[in-house]
């Protein structure tokens, strides 16, 4: 079963995100307290823990959850198998996938030690139903 490993936020868009453990996802807004909330329909960003671990091995870095500017770090789900329009139940919240990765022309303000994987492997969602999400919450694809 897929689960939330970290809930991450930053106060400025140029800062790395840190795991806050629990956060409120607000419909039509994103993660309350995060610098990226309310900016676009890409309200919440997701990244797989497996992608972070692979980047660590490939680039010889020691990134952890939030290091690549994602809001939710998930484990046990192939995020790149998702399609735009898919819905995810994350704890009590309901998310809808609006974008997979980011075009190279889109600005990406943060990398970890020169490595950036969110534009290639990140999944961006809007919040359809809000709720408090926490480390350990189950994640389920609703098709």
Image (tube, rainbow, N blue to C red):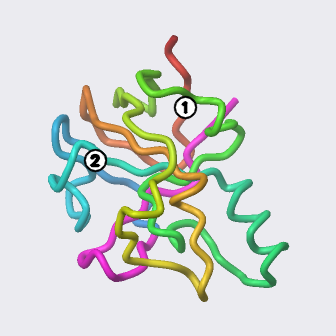
Q: Could you tell me which residue is drawn at 37 percent across and 34 percent down?
A: 98
* Residue at numbered disc 2: 43
Q: Is residue 116 above or below residue 4?
A: below
Front residue of 5/51: it is 51
Task: Point out the residue furthest to the top here.
Answer: 143
Q: Nearer the viewer, residue 2 or 84?
A: 84
Q: Residue furthest bottom?
A: 113
Q: Quadrant of residue 103?
A: bottom left
Magenta stretch holds residue 17: yes
The residue lying at 19 percent from left, 35 percent from top is 27
Label 2: state its secondary structure.
loop
Measure the C-alpha gap from mark 2 to mark 1: 17 Å
Q: Is residue 39 left or right of residue 25?
A: left
At 44% across and 32% down in the image, what residue appears?
91
Q: Could you classify mark 2 by the number of other residues whose Cα lies within 10 Å: few (under 14), some (14-19), or many (20 or more)? A: many
Q: State which region is magenta.
A: 1-18
Q: Is residue 119 above or below residue 66?
A: above
Q: Dot 1 corresponds to which residue?
A: 139
Camera-nearest label, 2 or 1: 2
Q: Is residue 24 above or below residue 10?
A: above
Relative side of 81 to 33, left or right: right
The spot of residue 99 in percent (x, y) is 42, 40
Q: In the depicted view, which residue is nearer to us: 8 or 120?
A: 120
In the orientation shown, which residue stands out farthest toward the front? 105
Mark positioned earlier in the residue sequence (2 or 1): 2
Residue 138, given in percent of the width and then of the height, sits at 56, 32
- Identify the image quadrant of residue 58: bottom right
Vertical position of residue 55 compared to residue 77: above or below: below
């Amino acid at each position: 079963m897929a689960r939330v490993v970290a809930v991450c936020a930053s106060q400025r868009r140029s800062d790395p995100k840190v795991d806050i453990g629990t956060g409120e996802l607000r419909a039509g807004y994103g993660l309350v307290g995060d610098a990226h909330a309310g900016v676009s329909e890409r309200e919440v960003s997701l990244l797989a823990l497996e992608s972070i671990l692979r980047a660590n091995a490939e680039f010889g870095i020691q990134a952890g959850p939030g290091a690549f500017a994602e809001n939710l770090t998930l484990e046990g789900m192939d995020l790149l198998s998702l399609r735009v329009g898919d819905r995810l139940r994350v704890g009590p919240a309901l998310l809808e996938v609006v974008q997979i990765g980011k075009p190279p022309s889109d600005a990406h303000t943060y990398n970890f030690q020169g490595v950036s994987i969110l534009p290639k492997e990140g999944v961006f969602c809007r919040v359809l139903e809000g709720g408090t999400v926490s480390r350990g919450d189950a994640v389920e694809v609703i098709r």
